[in-house]
Amino acid sequence: MNDPSVELASRMGRLAQDLHGGACLQEVLQGIVDAAVQTVPHAEHAGVTLRTPRQTTCTPVASDDFVRAVDQLQYDLGEGPCLSALFDEPLVRMPDVTTETRWPAFTARARKAGPGSMLSFRLVATDTQHGGLNLYAEQPGRFDELDEHIGLLFAAHAAGALGGLLRREQLSAALSTHDTIGQAKGILVERYRINSDAAFQLLVRASQHTNTKLAEIADHLVRTGELRGPSFPDPPVFP
């Protein structure tokens, strides 16, 4: 029988290598979200919150539209676990949305939106930059001490990768690249009538096929309307 602690250490080691290998903000954030759902036992949905130097709060990457909707609800109301993790506590727990009292406006709406429980971890906090990781489960009481323990280890690795990237490039430049990728995804969503996650997969496949940086693929598509790489059926087929 495999030792769970050894298996976890091995997984975290691979995670660190994968995240630190990300070439741009979008790729690192996507890696954080994908790995979070795979690594934290009861995490069903995940997303990253960023607060920019212009005081704009956004979810640049999420596992699905469920996360985007619940995150946006917190931004609109100015309260919720993800914002508390950014500015107050490095780990914020919401065990049960039906009994939570700290964020009354958020929980009143969230009960209808779907999340039963939530964990939020701070990833980065400076004078001008804030970032957090939000994990969601659809049922109350899903997250336990093991989820918190693994989540904290995961967040530490993710914070290291994100912090390293932000030291290599200014956040404004990174977010400009993110905006271009967002525009490119929008073009593909409209062209192929697919969702945002499928559009990002197309950009990644084009990047891998042409050995070209994802940001360059997106910029070329936005400027010319052409998606470099293999031609895709209409609609594209995903494995």
Image: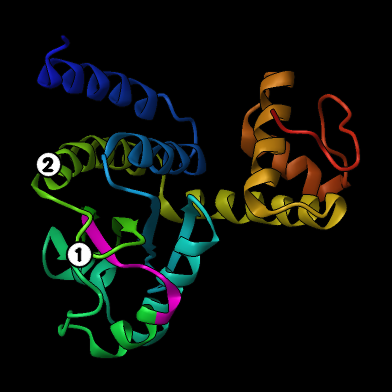
Q: Which residue is at the front of the view, 35 or 178?
A: 35
Q: Which mark is residue 65?
A: none
Q: Give the residue type at disc 2.
A: Leu
* Crowd band around label 1 with a 10 angstrom C-alpha radius: few (<14), some (14–19), many (20+): many
Mark sitting earlier along the chain (2/1): 1
Please name whichever residue, 125 or 239, is drawn nearer the observer in this view of the structure.
Answer: 239
- The CA distance from mark 2 to mark 1 is 19 Å
Q: Quadrant of the N terminus?
A: top left
Image quadrant occupied by the C terminus? top right
For the question of whether residue 126 can be seen, the reply is yes
Mark 2 lies on a secondary structure that is helix
Residue 105 spot, x, y in % from top left: 30, 90
Q: What span is in magenta?
A: 112-121
Q: Residue at x 86, y 32 (%)?
A: 232
46 horizontally vs 118: left or right:
right
Residue at 27% of width from left, 76% of height from top? 80
Provide the secondary structure element on which disc 1 rests: helix
The label number, if any, that marks residue 146 in the structure image = 2
Looking at the rendered image, the disc whose residue lies closer to the viewer, 2 or 1, is 2
Residue found at x 87% / y 40%: 226
> Image quadrant of residue 81?
bottom left
| Residue where numbered disc 1 is placed | 85
